[in-house]
Amino acid sequence: MTRPRHRLEHGAVVVVRLVARCLPRPLSLGLGTALGRLFHALHRPRRELAVANLRAAFPARSDAECRAILRATFEQFGRHVVDFLNFSGMRPERMLALVEVDGAAHVERAQARGRGVMYFTGHFGSWELQVLVHAYRFGPIVMVARTLDNPLLERMIERLRGSAGTRVVPRRGAVRGLLGALKRGESVGMMIDQHMQDRSAVEVSFFRRSASTTSAIAALALRTGAPIIPVFALPIPRGRYRLVYEAPVDPPAPDDPDPVRTYTQRCTDVLETYVRRHPHLWLWMHRRWRAPAEPGEGSRPEGVG
């Protein structure tokens, strides 16, 4: 159901998109930074939740350091939103010229096997941009995404993702669609950093706190033999990006008593390594953990993956 608030939000995004595309690239990214600062100022509950998450993850850091990371997180999120709107209107060659790709050989070897490929990331860096860039560089993917509360924005984002050939399947019934894609030798993508409440969820450690996590990526990989490749889009100077494909995650041993959980934990460990390296690039504002941090949790030394 469309509400007046939905129309206002959609209208605001349309205006930002038009303005951002008219500006030179440095000013467009500056607009994103300003929007991020505005979000930071207006969303006090999310701000305090994020600070609590940062304190639990990095207990050695001061409150001032955690709040500085959070300000940078909001600013990066604002730039991410604006540049996603920019990228969606670019010609593919212009888009690809702004992105460096590391680890392309991992993708090419995986695709050559013909079993399909699974990719995962989190709400980290410029995750929407990597979907567009990947589609033009290596071919479209089938991805799972949470439906937005605003149906107008949901249709807009679905259209932008689809402009590169990406197909989006909703969470409900997603496994069947992903399995079919893998059997056809296609590529699929998932986010693994959202709290899950259905029966397929498994508990893994993320920053030494228990986190309910989707098991679908591990279960599908074990069933089909498709490799799992981590991918992250990192912003770098001068409005450019580095798209990093890591080596496929090692599958569990044949005699592993809980292979799905082991595989899911290994994927989560890769994501945690990146978040520890670049904490301002992860969205600390969402409720990844539903239980309060216990004393001593999150105390692993920084920089350890």
Image (cartoon, rainbow, N blue to C red):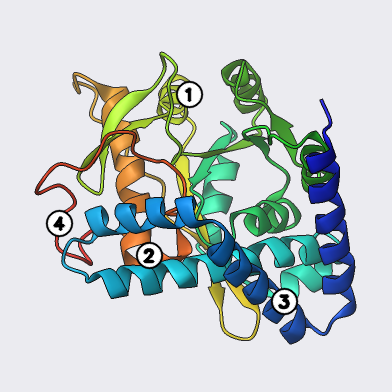
Q: CA distance from mark 3 to mark 1?
A: 41 Å
| As drawn, 239 above or below 157 | below
Q: Which residue is mark 2?
A: 279
Name the amino acid type tagged 3.
Leu
Mark 1 burial class by Cα count in 10 Å: few <14, some 14-19, many 20+: many
Residue at the spot x=84%, y=39% of the render?
A: 4
Q: Are marks 3 and 4 in contact (CB under 8 Å)?
A: no
Contact check, label 1 and label 4, Cβ < 8 Å? no
Which amino acid is tagged 2?
Pro
User: Sequence order check: which comes first, mark 1 or mark 4?
Assistant: 1
Between disc 1 and disc 4, the foreground one is 4
Spot occupied by residue 17 in the image (x, y as percentages of width and height): 84, 64
- Residue identified by numbered label 4: 300
Disc sitting over residue 220 in the figure: 1
Q: Could you tell me which residue is drawn at 43 percent across and 42 percent down?
A: 193
Q: CA distance from mark 2 to mark 4?
A: 14 Å
